Amino acid sequence: MDVQVIIDNLPLYLQGLRTTIVLVFASLVVGLLLAIPIALLASSKSKWISALPKAYIYFFRGTPLLVQMFMIYHGMGQFEAVRESFLWVIFQQAWTCALVAFALNTAAYTGEILRGTIEQTPYGEVEAAKSCGMSNAQIYRRIILPSTFRRALPAYGNEVIFMLHGSSLAGLITIVDLFGAAKIVNARNFVPFESFIAAGIFYLAITFMIVWGFKKAEHHWHAYLRPRES
């Protein structure tokens, strides 16, 4: 194993690491902002209201992320209406196309996670809030959503990790992320094992930090579930 190749190309890996972190973080933020209204609408008792968000969730969970990204990156440019609109500023750049694909994908998975936890909110908590004179908006803001976010933490932690690993697909559309950096190192030096094992170590390190962060968050936000010490 030629470790010197990894050392010589460390600046390229660090550049790819930065791109990966920024892209994943931005995708998760946008995806979460989209997922909250999607989950609220999908959990509605009205079939007319919940039909569209459920269809959105079904589509993005039922098709591969790679297909979605290629549809956005390679497919949107074939429409003249898109090329002549303000949207072309987004779809002509590989980075923003990846951001759109990742955000829409994680919004569907996160929306389904939140929908499930919203529907599993204990009925007694809602009834207690109603007895205190809270409106529906107050019940969602003070009771349902805080409880939902706490209970969704373990599942959402897995979604963040999946999004990190899925972000490696960005290297297929000319973005120099961690996977893209490994491809460049391999093309220059013909060392596939060294180039990709280095990227794998970086991914493993980020995953470890994500797991550690969510464990800390769960320990804090789930403290009320632990038995009190006598």
Image: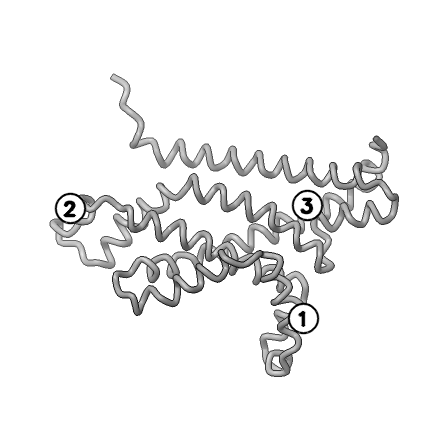
At which x and y percent is residue 177? Answer: 70, 50
Residue type marked 1: Gln
At which x and y percent is residue 148? Answer: 33, 47
Looking at the picture, the colour scheme in use is: one colour
- The residue tagged with tag 2: helix, strand or loop? helix
- Within 10 Å of disc 2 (Cα), the crowding (few <14, some 14-19, many 20+) is few
- For marks 3 and 2, the one nearer the N-term is 3
Reading the image, the residue beneath label 1 is 92
- For marks 1 and 2, the one nearer the N-term is 1
Residue type marked 2: Ala
Disc 3 and disc 2: Cα gap in Å? 48 Å
Q: Image quadrant of residue 217?
A: top left
Label 3 near label 1: C-beta < 8 Å?
Answer: no
Q: Residue at x 64, y 82 (%)?
A: 80
Reading the image, the residue beneath label 2 is 128
Label 2 near label 3: C-beta < 8 Å?
Answer: no
Disc 1 and disc 3: Cα gap in Å? 23 Å
Which quarter shows the N terminus? Answer: top right
At which x and y percent is residue 136? Answer: 21, 58
Q: Residue at x 47, y 37 (%)?
A: 214
At which x and y percent is residue 161? Answer: 55, 43
Reading the image, the residue beneath label 3 is 17
* Residue that protrudes farthest toward the top in the picture: 230
Residue type marked 3: Leu
